[in-house]
Image (cartoon, rainbow, N blue to C red):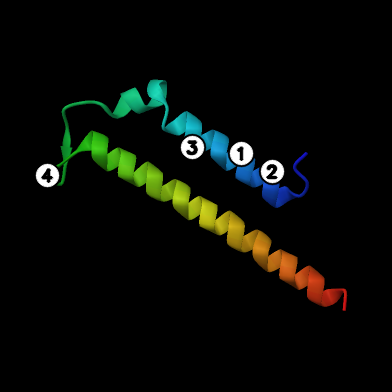
């Protein structure tokens, strides 16, 4: 169904994001604590969301670079 390592990494990243932003693990951050004056829960959501976006960009760019390198070598 999903061919290639890049597609498998994207599926794994989707599952990791789903688990990280779902109730049981998300409830760990729901405490009355402030970090640098910011509540921990929204800060943790923003950091997790940013890390997922960064990992997604890394996986897509890495697979994109390998795809172009392979197509140029075939010529």
Q: Secondary structure at mark 4?
A: loop
Q: Secondary structure at mark 3?
A: helix
- Label 2 and label 1: CA atoms lie apart by 6 Å
Crowding near the residue tagged with mark 2, few <14, some 14–19, many ≥20 C-alpha atoms within 10 Å: few
Residue at 80% from the left image edge and 71% from the top image edge = 71
- Dot 2 and dot 1 residues touching (CB under 8 Å): yes
Q: Secondary structure at mark 1?
A: helix
- Label 2 and label 3: CA atoms lie apart by 14 Å
The image position of residue 16, as x and y in percent, is 53, 35
| Residue indicated by mark 1 | 12
- Label 1 and label 3: CA atoms lie apart by 9 Å
**Label number found at residue 17:** 3
Q: Is residue 66 above or below residue 72?
A: above
Question: In front: mark 4 or mark 3?
Answer: 3
Where the N terminus falls, by quadrant? top right
Circle nearer the N terminus (2, 3)? 2
| Residue indicated by mark 2 | 8
**Label number found at residue 37:** 4
* Among the 4 quarters of the image, the one containing residue 44: top left
Crowding near the residue tagged with mark 4, few <14, some 14–19, many ≥20 C-alpha atoms within 10 Å: few
The image position of residue 12, as x and y in percent, is 61, 39
Circle nearer the N terminus (2, 4)? 2
Question: In front: mark 2 or mark 4?
Answer: 2
Query: Can you name the residue that lies furthest to the bottom here?
Result: 75
The image position of residue 47, as x and y in percent, is 34, 46
Circle nearer the N terminus (1, 3)? 1
The count of marks equals 4
**Label number found at residue 24:** none
- Label 4 and label 3: CA atoms lie apart by 26 Å
33 sits left or right of 63 in the view? left
- Label 2 and label 4: CA atoms lie apart by 39 Å
Residue at 38% from the left image edge and 42% from the top image edge = 48
């Amino acid at each position: 169904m999903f061919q290639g390592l890049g597609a498998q990494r994207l599926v794994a990243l989707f599952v990791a994001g789903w688990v990280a932003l779902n109730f049981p693990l998300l409830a760990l951050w729901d405490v009355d604590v402030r970090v640098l004056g910011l509540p921990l829960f929204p800060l943790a959501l923003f950091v997790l969301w940013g890390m997922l976006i960064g990992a997604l960009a890394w996986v897509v760019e890495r697979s994109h670079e390998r795809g172009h390198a392979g197509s140029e070598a075939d010529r």
